[in-house]
Each structure stands twice: as C-alpha cells, then as structure tokens.
Amino acid sequence: VATGSLEKKGGGRKRFSPETEKSVAQYLRTNFKPGSEIQYQVIQNIAKNYSTDQTFKASRGWVVKFVDRQHLRHYYKFA
C-alpha cells in the first residue's frame, strides 16, 4: 500500500489559449535575437494583440509563467 497523496493527471487551471501562446512565442523567436532583453510589458502587449478574448489581461503573473512554459529564459533576458 502506497502512502502519501496521489496527484490527479490533468488537474489544475487550464492554460489560456495554447494557440495564442504558440503564436506569441513564435513572434518573439522571429523578432528578437537570442540574448536580447525583452520587457514583460512588451510580451503583455503582444499577447493582448494575438488574443481574441477581450477579457484576457496578460498579467505579469501570466507572462512569468508563459516565459517558463515556453523555455524562453534560455534564449532571452527579461526585465
């Protein structure tokens, strides 16, 4: 008998529009050279422009998690 809690697969909050995230990541990779600095506000603006959801705010928290999900810290500096 195993002890401890078991985590459910697929639990937690769902990501906002994977298509939008993919488009934003591709835009960054296409328009910014590796090693360059990108401000969080720039990513917020790009994400809002790509989003079709009027309620999407692209908060700083979303941007930080987006950068981690897309492994962008390996290529860019963020401010």
Image (spheres, grey):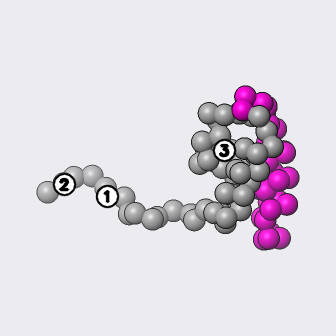
Tell me if residue 51 is in the magenta stretch. Answer: yes
Which secondary structure lies at badge 3? Answer: helix
Which secondary structure lies at badge 2? Answer: loop
**Residue shown at 65% from the left, 40% from the top:** 72
Amino acid at pointer 3: Val
**Residue shown at 77% from the left, 50% from the top:** 27
Image quadrant of residue 20?
bottom right
Image quadrant of residue 16?
bottom right
Which residue is nearer to you in this view: 2 or 32? 32
Circle 2 residue: 2
Closer to viewer: mark 3 or mark 2: 3
Residue 60 shows in this picture: no
Q: How many C-alpha atoms fall within 10 Å of the one at disc 2: few (<14), some, or many (≥20)? A: few
State how many labels appear. 3
> In this picture, is 62 found above or below 73?
below
Q: Which residues are magenta?
A: 34-59
Which residue is nearer to you in this view: 38 or 3? 38
Which residue is nearer to you in this view: 8 or 47? 47
**Residue shown at 38% from the left, 63% from the top:** 8
Tell me if residue 40 is in the magenta stretch. Answer: yes
**Residue shown at 78% from the left, 71% from the top:** 53
Amino acid at pointer 1: Leu
Residue 65 in the image: x percent, y percent? 64, 48
Please give the label number shown on residue 6.
1
For marks 3 and 1, give the CA distance.
28 Å
Residue that sits furthest to the top in the current view: 35
Please give the label number shown on residue 67.
3
- Pointer 3 with pointer 2, Cβ within 8 A: no
